[in-house]
Amino acid sequence: MSVLSELKTWSWIVKIWIPLYSLLLIIGVVIGTYFEPEFYWSVVVFGVPLVVIPRTYKNLVGGGCSLRFQMCALVKGMLAGFVFLFLSLLTDSLIWQTLSLVVGWSPLSLGISQDTYFIWFFSGVIGGFAARVIEVKGRTNPVKITIAGFE
């Protein structure tokens, strides 16, 4: 597998992150404006794991280990989580410079903002860990995710 085709297999991260980040930003600004700015991060705390964990799991299960780069699903989940974290951290620092002037507050000035970025990382790790567990069990098809857990 060439480096270019290997990079294309990671495009799902951006395809998930762009709409999810945009939606969470809009909902967070609305909630933060109508209630308290601290509630902006509650949208991230609940929204990110609900979307990122199952999507990471779905995209990594059955992928096997990359012999070229010696990576299995758990390591791929860690890398995906790091990319999610980096994209969010970078975008927040750019967007909130302007958006804070419009809405009158910035969630980046709150003390909890640094900790919430790790939710992106750990959601990727949990999705990768679940995919690795399924691979070790010998399954290659994605397991259905339900409210009760994995089937």
Image (tube, grey):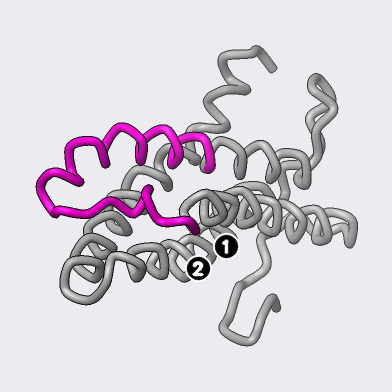
The amino acid beneath tag 2 is Leu
Secondary structure at numbered mark 2: helix
Residue appearing at x 41%, y 70% in the figure: 42
Locate residue 8 relative to residue 134 in the image: left or right: left
Q: Position of residue 142 (x, y in %)?
A: 66, 61
Residue on which disc 1 sits: 54
Q: Position of residue 134 (x, y in %)?
A: 80, 60
The magenta segment is 85-112
- Alpha-carbon neighbours of circle 1 within 10 Å: few (<14), some, or many (≥20)? many
- Alpha-carbon neighbours of circle 2 within 10 Å: few (<14), some, or many (≥20)? few
Quadrant location, the N terminus: top right
Residue on which disc 2 sits: 50
Residue placed most toward the observer, 5 or 21:
21
Secondary structure at numbered mark 1: helix
Residue placed most toward the observer, 103 or 129:
103
Q: Nearer the viewer, mark 1 or mark 2?
A: 2
Q: Determine whether 1 is above or below 99 in the image.
A: above
Q: Position of residue 143 (x, y in %)?
A: 68, 67
The amino acid beneath tag 1 is Pro
Residue appearing at x 34%, y 54% in the figure: 107
